[in-house]
């Protein structure tokens, strides 16, 4: 075969398809293969085989190994194929669709998962997957962020402690403080409010569970130190108090009074797993729940405008009142002056 022809720069689509063929060939040969044999099987040059093996390791993140001239991929890199009913496939698809809708940057692993999921779906859902991928591919790229997610995922799966350089949130015009943190990764969770991913884990220096926005992580190092994860029931109990992501703040009982105009809409949704509701004689609604701090729920309360009133706790009532007062003062002038 013409070596020069084989060395021509492929299109992005062709290159992705070729990388997938190499990965699948290695998956089917758990004892590994020689690059010469891979080249012959796939009609490639040996030089391109070496390039693709390196790309699978460095760009895709597959655990590629090489020994005695043979190359392979760790068997645990691939999960067994899914056999889903139509209803199960729809449930998985809808979950993935939520990730696409709320992702603010391109995630190559999410895109790859969609492609693999599409192979086992009915034609109608395959078409929706293709359209979802088109939307996802329009999102901006952030290679550093993707690399951090992969490293944190590896550390989470292997119960390894990580060291991170973290930049705290800016506050009142001041830049966030940058610090080195040693963390046991317990969970990686997406936020519906901020469209971001968060690392939830045990901060060894502070001896407490803390929440870290992955976009603010500047460097990740997976250490050799292992840890025992907490009992699932204990962790889930703590997370139930979180409104969205934050679960490391003091438990706070929040009591709200909604007007009759929005009471039915509030009742249509379970906003928090611990919520309790009581319909009032005037058609309004009394809503209460115990949440982790008030930072996240405050944004939700403000979204209801003047159709909600904070009854408890007093500090939250004061915060909301102050925010609404500042907003009202800005709209006092019809011209915005």
Image (spheres, grey):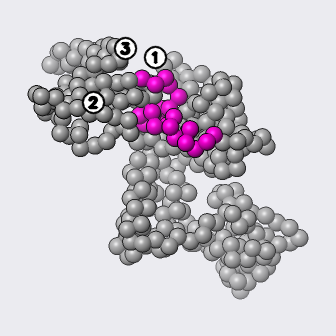
Disc nearest the viewer among 3 and 1: 3
Above or below, comparing residue 250 to residue 79 in the picture:
above
Tell me residue 333's x, y (percent).
17, 15
- What is the magenta range? 230-252
Other-residue count near label 2 (Cα within 10 Å), few / some / many at <14 / 14–19 / ≥20: many
Tell me residue 92's x, y (percent).
43, 61
Q: Earlier in the sequence, mark 1 or mark 2?
A: 1
Question: In the structure shown, which secondary structural element does the residue marked by tag 3 occupy?
Answer: helix
Question: In the structure shown, which secondary structural element does the residue marked by tag 1 occupy?
Answer: loop
Q: Which residue is mark 3?
A: 315
Q: Residue at x 65, y 30 (%)?
A: 203
Q: Which residue is mark 1?
A: 172
**Pointer 3 and pointer 2: residues touching (CB < 8 Å)?**
no
Q: Residue at x 86, y 67 (%)?
A: 67
| Front in this rendered view, residue 233 or 106 | 233
Q: Which residue is mark 2?
A: 287
Report how far apart the C-alphas of labels 1 and 2 lie in the structure. Answer: 32 Å
């Amino acid at each position: 075969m013409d070596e020069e022809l084989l060395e021509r720069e492929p299109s992005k689509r062709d290159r992705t398809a070729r990388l997938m063929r190499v990965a699948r060939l290695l998956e089917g040969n758990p004892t590994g293969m020689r690059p010469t044999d891979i080249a012959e099987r796939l009609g490639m040059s040996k030089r391109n085989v070496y390039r693709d093996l390196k790309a699978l390791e460095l760009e895709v993140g597959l655990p590629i190994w090489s020994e005695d001239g043979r190359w392979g991929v760790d068997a645990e890199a691939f999960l067994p194929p899914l056999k889903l009913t139509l209803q199960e496939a729809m449930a998985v698809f809808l979950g993935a669709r939520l990730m696409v809708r709320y992702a603010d940057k391109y995630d190559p692993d999410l895109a790859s998962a969609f492609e693999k999921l599409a192979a086992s779906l009915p034609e109608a859902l395959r078409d929706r997957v293709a359209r979802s991928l088109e939307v996802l591919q329009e999102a901006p790229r952030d290679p550093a962020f993707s690399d951090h997610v992969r490293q944190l995922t590896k550390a989470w799966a292997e119960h390894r402690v990580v060291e991170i350089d973290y930049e705290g949130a800016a506050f009142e015009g001041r830049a966030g403080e940058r610090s080195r943190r040693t963390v046991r990764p317990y969970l990686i969770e997406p936020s519906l409010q901020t469209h971001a991913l968060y690392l939830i884990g045990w901060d060894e220096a502070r001896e407490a569970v803390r929440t870290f926005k992955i976009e603010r992580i500047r460097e990740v190092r997976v250490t050799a130190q292992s840890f025992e994860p907490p009992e699932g029931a204990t962790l889930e109990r703590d997370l139930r108090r979180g409104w969205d992501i934050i679960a490391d703040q003091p438990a706070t009982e929040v009591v709200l009074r909604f007007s009759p105009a929005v009471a039915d809409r509030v009742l249509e949704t379970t906003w928090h797993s611990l919520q309790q509701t009581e319909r009032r004689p005037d058609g309004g609604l009394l809503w209460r729940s115990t949440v982790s701090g008030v930072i996240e729920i405050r944004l939700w309360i403000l979204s209801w405008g003047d159709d909600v009133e904070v009854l408890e706790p007093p500090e939250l009532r004061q915060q909301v009142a102050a925010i609404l007062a500042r907003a009202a003062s800005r709209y006092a002038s019809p011209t915005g002056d």
